[in-house]
Image (spheres, helix red, strand yellow):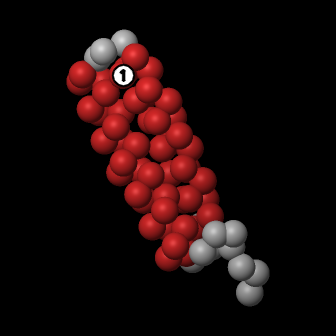
């Protein structure tokens, strides 16, 4: 599958934005926002790592 690197990029960007949101909501003491942002960070960060491991990053040329 050639779109593996694109999935890693998209999942990684979402995880980075969720990490930024997690820090901001933690500073503002917003519990629900913190939970949703941290959950998003954990899930999409895990997807990014798992996709990079299974699909290979950087992609190899065949």
Q: Residue at x 42, y 50 (%)?
A: 44
- Residue 41 locus on image (x, y percent): 40, 43
- Residue 47 locus on image (x, y percent): 42, 59
Q: Residue at x 69, y 69 (%)?
A: 58
Task: Label 1: state its secondary structure.
Answer: helix
- Residue 4 locus on image (x, y percent): 57, 68
Farthest residue toward the top?
Answer: 28
Quadrant where the C terminus is found in the figure: bottom right
Farthest residue toward the right?
Answer: 61
Q: Nearer the viewer, residue 39 or 59?
A: 39
Q: Residues within 10 Å of mark 1 (few under 14, many from 20)?
A: some
Q: Nearer the viewer, residue 10 or 34?
A: 34
Quadrant where the N terminus is found in the figure: bottom right
Left or right: 17 with respect to 47?
A: right
Q: Which residue is mark 1?
A: 26
**As displayed, is residue 37 above or below residue 27?**
below
């Amino acid at each position: 599958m050639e779109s593996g690197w694109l999935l890693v990029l998209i999942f990684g960007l979402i995880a980075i934005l969720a990490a930024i949101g997690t820090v901001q909501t933690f500073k503002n003491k917003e519990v629900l926002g913190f939970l949703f942002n941290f959950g998003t960070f954990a899930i999409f960060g895990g997807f990014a790592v798992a996709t990079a491991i299974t699909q290979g990053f950087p992609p190899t040329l065949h």
